[in-house]
Image: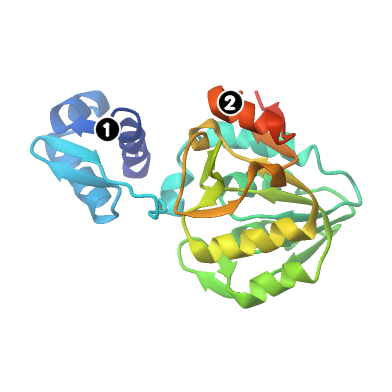
Amino acid sequence: MKSAVRRSQILQDLAEVGSVTVVDLAERFAVSPMTIRRDLLELERLGLARRVHGGAVAGRGRSYEPPYMVRTTENSEVKKNIGALTAGLIAEGDSVAIDTGSTCLEVARNLQGRRNLTVITPGLRIAGLLVDEPDIRLIVAGGIARPGEASLIGELARHAFSELSVDRLILAVGGIDAAFGLSEYNWDDVLVKQAMIRSAKEVILVADSRKFDQIAFARIAGLEAVAMLVTDEEPSGQLQAALKAAGVKVVVAS
């Protein structure tokens, strides 16, 4: 098992139960305790965990954004399903803004080979996927590139969307909460996302269920900004009620 996948699964354990032990992880992954200690040391260096005697405890704060390469290994099959279903909602002739992130990348992947689309994105990875598509007019928002994230932020990126009106926005977020609404880890990203929302006739939110009942550092908008949520399972409890009250249609990708 690759170290990135193993560390991603360790993070999932920390998110679910709050702590892990070196002995249990070594047995589970069939690796040496030293390998697990190196994993925990790296997760601590990234701010994702805090090492304690015999193991580690969760170390994420609301302002901490998990590295992109870690996020790509989390729920990858779920994100592929969400991406395929969402791409099917985009019609020929549409103008589409596509946000950054691993789930939005799967949406873009499923647009390859499509005809007569206009796509604008602040995501450099998404632009790289679509740049050679002959029947897609690609517009890349200007701005400052965020290392690691390969996203564009700043006044140029915000201004690009303020001058446009698109049919649909494919939006990604860090958390979805009944009271706090949509939130993200990085304030610079939030400012661009808010401009994207204002530019769109319809906002389609793509998020797996691990984003439910989560609050990240900065608020993007209320749930009423969203027309549709494409996810992997039905929300429950207060979030389900809040989405219904806001008029958000929930579509589950199997």
**Above or below, comparing residue 101 to residue 77 in the picture:** below
- The quarter of the image holding the N terminus is top left
- The quarter of the image holding the C terminus is top right
- Could you say whether the residue bearing mark 2 is in a helix, strand or loop? loop
Residue 232 visible in the displayed image = no
Residue 40 visible in the displayed image = yes
Picture quarter containing residue 97?
Answer: bottom right
Q: Which residue is mark 2?
A: 235
Q: Which residue is mark 1?
A: 18
- What residue lies at 87% left-to-right and 44% top-to-bottom? 91
> In the drawing, what numbered circle is on residue 27?
none
**Above or below, comparing residue 20 to residue 180 in the picture:** above
Q: Position of residue 25 (x, y in %)?
A: 21, 29
Q: Is residue 150 left or right of residue 43?
A: right
Picture quarter containing residue 224?
Answer: top right
**Above or below, comparing residue 100 to residue 213 in the picture:** below
Out of 199 and 77, give the one closest to the viewer.
Answer: 199
- What residue lies at 14% left-to-right and 28% top-to-bottom? 23
Picture quarter containing residue 204?
Answer: top right
Spatial CA span between label 1 and label 2: 22 Å
Q: Is residue 122 left or right of residue 186?
A: right
- Pointer 1 or 2: first along the chain: 1
**Above or below, comparing residue 121 to residue 42 in the picture:** below
- Could you say whether the residue bearing mark 1 is in a helix, strand or loop? loop
